[in-house]
Amino acid sequence: MKTRIGIMGYGNLGRGVEIAVNAADDMELAAVFTRRAPETVKILSPDVPVVHADEAEQWKDKIDVLILCGGSATDLPEQTPAYARMFNVIDSFDTHARIPEHFANVDKAAKEGGKTAIISVGWDPGMFSLNRVYANAILPDGKDYTFWGKGISQGHSDAVRRIKGVKNAKQYTIPVEDALKAVRAGENPELTTRQKHIRECFVVLEDGADAERVEKEIKTMPNYFADYDTIVHFISEEELQRDHAGMAHGGFVFRSGRTGVNGEHKHIIEYSLKLDSNPEFTTSVLVAYARAAKRLYEEGQSGCKTVLDIPPAYLSDKSGEELRAHLL
Amino acid sequence: MKTRIGIMGYGNLGRGVEIAVNAADDMELAAVFTRRAPETVKILSPDVPVVHADEAEQWKDKIDVLILCGGSATDLPEQTPAYARMFNVIDSFDTHARIPEHFANVDKAAKEGGKTAIISVGWDPGMFSLNRVYANAILPDGKDYTFWGKGISQGHSDAVRRIKGVKNAKQYTIPVEDALKAVRAGENPELTTRQKHIRECFVVLEDGADAERVEKEIKTMPNYFADYDTIVHFISEEELQRDHAGMAHGGFVFRSGRTGVNGEHKHIIEYSLKLDSNPEFTTSVLVAYARAAKRLYEEGQSGCKTVLDIPPAYLSDKSGEELRAHLL
């Protein structure tokens, strides 16, 4: 029997989940839930119902795993605990600093409902976290490096858009090539914020806005830009739509460690992602963990988990025998 | 209470386990077992007993996990099932084709003894296997590539040493740079054996041996060399000892996949290792999984496992709370 998936929220992530579920032989999409008027939401799968979010509870017994596709700022802190009482759920909560609090809320709700929840699934947090944990456990004497990009940062793009006189903007985070090289060469550099990433902004001004003032406001903005080398380009709305609508992203996780009687042997572990579509890769991870959530639930393991708690084999549709024979 | 580790067999792997255990705050080395006369085996840790392998059973209650450091050809197929009846065990069995059979034997023995065994731990099988399984689950529509090197292949070095007239030899497996580039660029190339790896041999001849015949025998040897571009150098024993005694190794695992309504988005996942010491990295992985074996045993999970069955958090000496707060 196929794993029946529900999607809560139909933006870039919801659509990505739909694509990934349709590509998986062992899954089927049961319903898409939305807070908009359902008849206004056009999905890719002709035979799948679009249902108002208020009616989700009626689908409790028709869905094995509900994948929550809302945002981390306001949607998921509410939604994940609420739905974890009724469904096995997966979310991509990515506000690192608030993960412990979110975990506690979801754990309580999922245990009360006897359901399995997996939070903070995606690539960072997610696959990058896994690689940090594996590499730290293997090389306890070492240094971690995480680089992001080249890709658009939503938070930094939003920050630029909030500046007076800015009509629209996209901000790319770009890892500094020399820093990557030094880490890869095992030099264990101490890197400042500025030495790790460059920030490049493409900005559309409102009519009559003062470009010089906007550029200065961007470059001096605390936390977001002041500690970085920031490049600002002013372009037209047409250019922004034409050249900067892509959703490519990626990044690198390194562990540079030592072993030996006197730490005489260096080892570099590198994990990297080069992604044409950030949301579609993220949702491919979400869907693989939905498979794990169903299996954990069937084993009676209720409560909240993260990717760190899940055996890798649980993500696969292949049996243990097949995995040992072909992928081990 | 610290995890008490035993080492069975004291060669390069046994010594590497000793170094890794001494570097771990939560572990202590209880004993080293050997089939040689114990008084002839000199270890790094002054206060740890060296004991004959025949007396291992007497240590059943003084050791939490026994790490088996024998070879895959003849030692481990016998040793792992035998010791899995008495101890929680870890091995680095790396004959891929025989893993299913080894798993079945160890599983039976470990279940009879109520112990936990984890087999085929290291980097391939091991960390590379994990990366293949994660990446396949996330990107079901894609291609896998594994490259090894640059590093010495023991099996190929042995094959050269068996040729008449060869006194000593080392063989390096080297990934072909253009193949790596094509995979990294998402070209999804179909690669022949020859296009993936080069084999480079450093050979010491016996007095009076015919270099031309030896070179021809190497280059035409079926399975080992005939399908590769092979480079043969003749050098002196002194040069071999001086320049080719290192144990560096490494490799690359790629998954190159597609997502999207029409597969329009490409994604590349790359995992790579650059290791100064193949045995010390391997044993660092073994020791991390020893931590997991103890925990699984305490949970009552007896039988045989592989790295695919173990939650990543079980490898770490940090709590779930710490991992979620700092590494997720």
Image (cartoon, coloured by chain):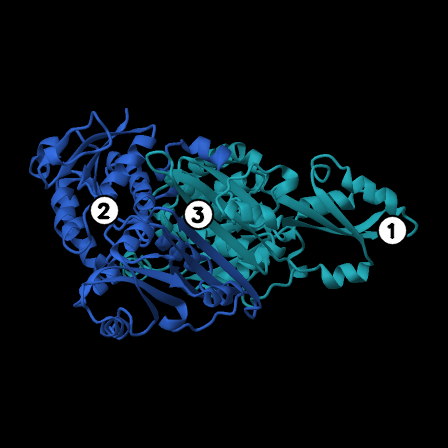
Chain colours: A blue, B cyan
Judge depth for marks 2 and 1 and give the one in front.
2
Which class describes the residues within 10 Å of circle 3: few (<14), some (14-19), or many (20+)? many
Name the one closer to the observer, A202 or A198: A202
Chain of the residue displaying label 1: B
- Residue B128, given in percent of the width and then of the height, sits at 49, 46
Secondary structure of the residue carrying tag 3 is: strand
User: Do dots 2 and 3 share one subunit?
Assistant: no
Q: CA distance from mark 2 to mark 1?
A: 65 Å
Name the one closer to the observer, A192 or B100: A192
* Image quadrant where one finds the N terminus of chain B: bottom left
Residue beneath label 1, please? B206
- Residue B195, given in percent of the width and then of the height, sits at 63, 41
- The amino acid at mark 2 is Asp
Residue beneath label 3, please? B269
User: Do dots 2 and 1 share one subunit?
Assistant: no
Q: Quadrant of residue A224?
A: bottom left
Determine whether B208 is above or below A187 in the image: above
* Image quadrant where one finds the C terminus of chain B: bottom left
- The amino acid at mark 3 is Ile
Residue beneath label 2, please? A91
- Residue B154, given in percent of the width and then of the height, sits at 67, 48
Chain of the residue displaying label 3: B
Q: CA distance from mark 1 to mark 3?
A: 46 Å
Secondary structure of the residue carrying tag 2 is: loop
Please indicate whether residue B76 sits to the left or right of residue A271 in the image. Answer: right
Which class describes the residues within 10 Å of circle 1: few (<14), some (14-19), or many (20+)? some
- Residue positioned 32% across, 28% down in the render: A26
Name the one closer to the observer, B45 or B22: B22
